[in-house]
Amino acid sequence: MSTTSQLAKRFREVLLDGKWIANTNFKDQLSDVTWEQATAKIDSLNTIAMLTFHIDYYVAGLINVFEGGDLEIRDQYSFDLPPIENDEQWETLKNKLWKDAEKFASLLEQIPDAKMNEVFVDEKYDTYLRNIEGMIEHCYYHLGQITLIKKMILLKHK
């Protein structure tokens, strides 16, 4: 299996369908979260909806680069979630993440392995490989947060 196919598999695992590393994934964790739970604020923590938006923001930004565009995303905007005020808006956000995650993985599978060691956009961003591995790690980091925040919300409402 090629390096890019392996990376795409790992990416799908954390977002869409895996259980190997964390025994869960984004889709599994968010499947039963209501929009009220997704927007519930626990102390100074980010909301589940904000973390969902945050991950999709970066996924979509890298898709743009994979498709030949510029790296237009900026950290300062990565939590600029528009208000979620109903179930339809929450479902739209989740569905965008699922669609973007699959597109990211599919585009990644098409990248030749040789490109993995090339500079990603600018030397300051290192290589394609480091950025893709970083994206996977970033997703697991926030998956852990979502899992804990979800548990806190459920305990609070028992």
Image (cartoon, rainbow, N blue to C red):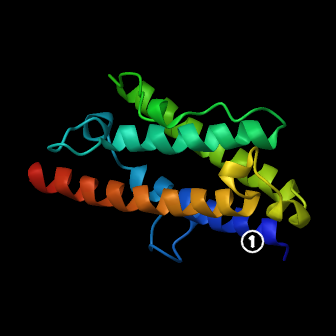
Position of residue 91 relative to residue 102, above or below, is above
Mark 1 residue crowding within 10 angstroms, few (<14) / some (14–19) / many (20+): some
Give residue 116's position: percent from left, percent from top: 81, 63
Side of 78 where 9 appears, left or right: right
Q: Is residue 114 visible?
A: yes
Side of 34 where 121 appears, left or right: right
Using the rendered view, name the quadrant where residue 34 is placed.
top left
In the image, 61 versus 158, the foreground residue is 61
Residue topped by disc 1: 6
Position of residue 47 relative to residue 135, above or below, is above
Side of 127 where 14 appears, left or right: left
Quarter the N terminus occupies:
bottom right
| Residue at image point 37% right, 38% down | 49
Using the rendered view, name the quadrant where residue 10 is placed.
bottom right
Q: Is residue 31 visible?
A: no
| Residue at image point 75% right, 50% down | 120
Give residue 130's position: percent from left, percent from top: 67, 62
In the image, 68 versus 121, the foreground residue is 121
| Residue at image point 29% right, 42% down | 46
- How many numbered marks are there? 1
| Residue at image point 79% right, 44% down | 66
Give residue 92's position: percent from left, percent from top: 51, 30
Give residue 26's position: percent from left, percent from top: 47, 55
In the image, 153 versus 118, the foreground residue is 118
Position of residue 56 relative to residue 27, above or below, is above
Name the amino acid, label 1. Gln
Using the rendered view, name the quadrant where residue 65 is placed.
top right
Q: Which type of secondary structure does the marked residue at label 1 adopt?
A: helix
